[in-house]
Image (spheres, rainbow, N blue to C red):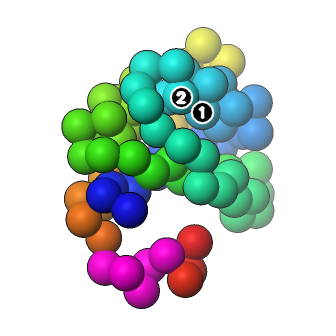
Amino acid sequence: MEAIGMVETRSLVAALEALDSMTKAANVQLVDLKKVGSGIVTVIVTGDVAAVSAAVETGKTAHTRTGGELISSNIIPRPHSGLSMIL
């Protein structure tokens, strides 16, 4: 795993819109889509650092097409191997 990218929204539809845009914008793979609760959904992708950065930037704006709310986003370049057990 070279990088992990996350986009968290309030709305499943917004998260799916973000995920669709992220995978079309860059060569990233879906790791997981976590439903946290209270309508909060986190999309987690992986790929090389540049691709994940581009995908997260695209996902941060894509959710607005559905009226969803961006809660948070983050990119972890070269994550520790222990993180893969959590994801």
Q: Give the range drawn in magenta.
A: 80-84
**Mark 2 against mark 1, which lies toward the viewer?**
2
Give the alpha-carbon distance from disc 2 to disc 1, as whole Å. Answer: 6 Å
In the rendered view, does 87 fall on the left or right side of 4?
A: right
Camera-nearest residue between 42 and 82: 82
User: Which quarter of the image is occupied by the C terminus?
Assistant: bottom right
Determine which quarter of the picture holds residue 51: top left
Label 1 sits on a secondary structure element that is helix
Amino acid at dot 2: Thr
Is residue 81 within the magenta segment?
A: yes
Amino acid at dot 1: Leu
* Residue at image coords 53%, 28%: 23
| Image mark for residue 49 | none
Camera-nearest residue between 18 and 64: 18
Q: Tell me the chief SS of the magenta region.
A: loop
Residue 51 visible, this angle: yes
Is residue 33 within the magenta segment?
A: no
Few, some or many C-alpha atoms within 10 Å of disc 2 (few <14, some 14-19, many ≥20)? many
Q: Are marks 2 and 1 in contact (CB under 8 Å)?
A: yes
Residue 63 visible, this angle: no
Please say if 66 is above or below 79: above
Q: Name the residue under label 2.
A: 23
Q: Position of residue 46 (x, y in %)?
A: 45, 51
Label 2 sits on a secondary structure element that is helix
Q: Mark 1 points at which residue?
A: 19
Q: Where is residue 56 in the image (x, y as percent from the top left)?
A: 39, 37
